[in-house]
Image: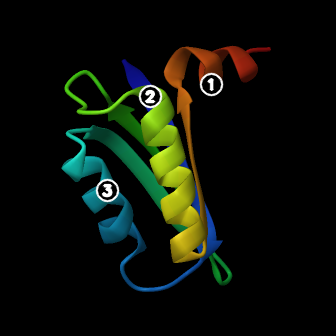
Amino acid sequence: MRAIVTVIGKDRVGIIADVCAILARNKVNVLDISQTVMQEYFTMIMLVDMLKDSISFDEMSSLLNDAGRELGLSIRIQREDIFNAMHRI
């Protein structure tokens, strides 16, 4: 299953590394990544592949949410099909 991960927060060194480390530990592969800094805010969208993940989608969602709180970021994950349905006109 593919999913969309979004990350938003105050810019600082290591955000990409922190998020990618969490994904890598759980065998989630990053397929595409886009990031930018808008004034002092970091934003990132990642397309990930969870076919070989070691935990369920719900567990990954909870893990990213908890990590975001600890890192001072908003980290969310959505299933690709739901993300696409929400953004279809």
Report x, y in % for residue 11.
Answer: 55, 81
Q: Does residue 43 appear anywhere in the picture?
A: no
Q: Amino acid at mark 3?
A: Ile
**Disc 3: which residue:** 22
Q: Amino acid at mark 2?
A: Phe
- Evaluate if marks 3 and 1 touch, with contact meaning CB atoms under 8 Å apart: no
**Disc 1: which residue:** 83
SS for tag 2? helix
| Residue under the image location 31 percent in, 56 percent down | 22
Report x, y in % for residue 66.
Answer: 54, 58
Q: Which mark is residue 53?
A: none
Which quarter of the figure has residue 77?
top right
**Disc 2: which residue:** 57
| Residue under the image location 62 percent in, 24 percent down | 83
List the single residue furthest toward the right: 89
Mark 2 → mark 1, Cα distance in angstroms: 14 Å
Q: Earlier in the sequence, mark 2 or mark 1?
A: 2
Q: Nearer the viewer, residue 60 or 20?
A: 60
- Packing grade of label 1 (10 A; few <14, some 14-19, many >=20) is few
